[in-house]
Amino acid sequence: MRGAVATGWVLALLATGCTGSGSGADASAPQQALPAGPVTSAPDQWAPPADCNGVGNLCWNCGSGATCQLLGNVCVPTPSGPPANRNEQTPYCLARVCMTYEQASCFCTGEAGAFYTACQEGPGSAAGLCASAGASCLSQSCCDGMICEKDSPTTSTCYQACSKSTDCASGCCTDLYDDGHMECASMAACTNPCAKRGGACQQKSDCCAGECLTVNPDGGPPYSCYPYCTGPTDCDGGCCGPITGEDASACTPCQ
């Protein structure tokens, strides 16, 4: 099969650094040594102590135990020494600072938590034990409430699962890849929905999944959306054929 004019998807991946510091810390200070053994588990939910001493507030209201992190305008724990990397004591990295479970619980249940996706996804996400929304799920499972979607022959990405538009910050809940899974997407995906498999298209970005292709030997129209496949079992009709000029295959009309 031959492809129409292709347009690449650009995925914005949300990354959180863990070696930064609050506004008053010395970035050149030596980092704490990592304890032996990786962080392998995290609690299911956040559980803040009775007094968070300002951690998790916005910068105008930092308390005695918090320092304003200018990047994000949020209150993070005041460091007692050099800033820590992610380790067994401080595995929860948010706002460029790595924290203990209690500190992160304060941060994520306070005003600051509303601005950090990892806070809503839970301790496992903040500890780097699962992939967050927008992150690759090729080598790591998605966090709870996420769906791993194959968005190209070589990439897979986590999306927030949903059942209605109010579940999504964007206000758009749709079957983005035409596979029966509902996930949060940009509002453009709802106002200008993609073409389902077999639907008419002019370029790759018109399709919910796969490529915009033609089965005409001369490479001319009509063009339709065909999902990627790795073998016959991936296709409803049981036919998976190579795409001309690409190292990929797509479900094809068996005739």
Image (tube, rainbow, N blue to C red):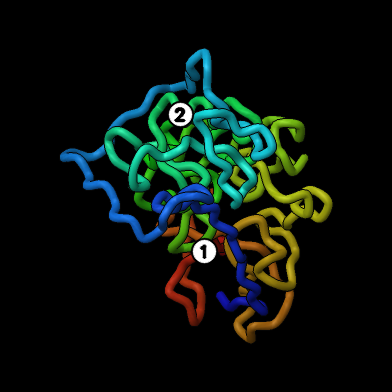
User: Which residue sits at x=73%, y=56%?
Assistant: 194
Residue 166: x, y in percent? Answer: 76, 31
Q: Residues within 10 Å of mark 2 (few under 14, many from 20)?
A: many
Residue found at the very far right of the displayed protein:
191
Q: Specify the label residue 103 is tagged with.
A: 2
Query: Which of disc 2 and disc 1 is earlier in sequence?
Result: 2
Residue 159: x, y in percent? Answer: 57, 44
User: Which residue sits at x=66%, y=48%?
Assistant: 176
Q: Amino acid at mark 2?
A: Gln
Q: Which residue is mark 1?
A: 250
Q: Nearer the viewer, residue 95 or 233?
A: 95
- Is residue 168 among what the camera can see? yes
Residue found at the very far top of the displayed protein:
50
Q: Amino acid at mark 1?
A: Ala
Looking at the rendered structure, the number of numbered marks drawn on it comes to: 2
Say if 221 sits above or below 84 in the image. Answer: below
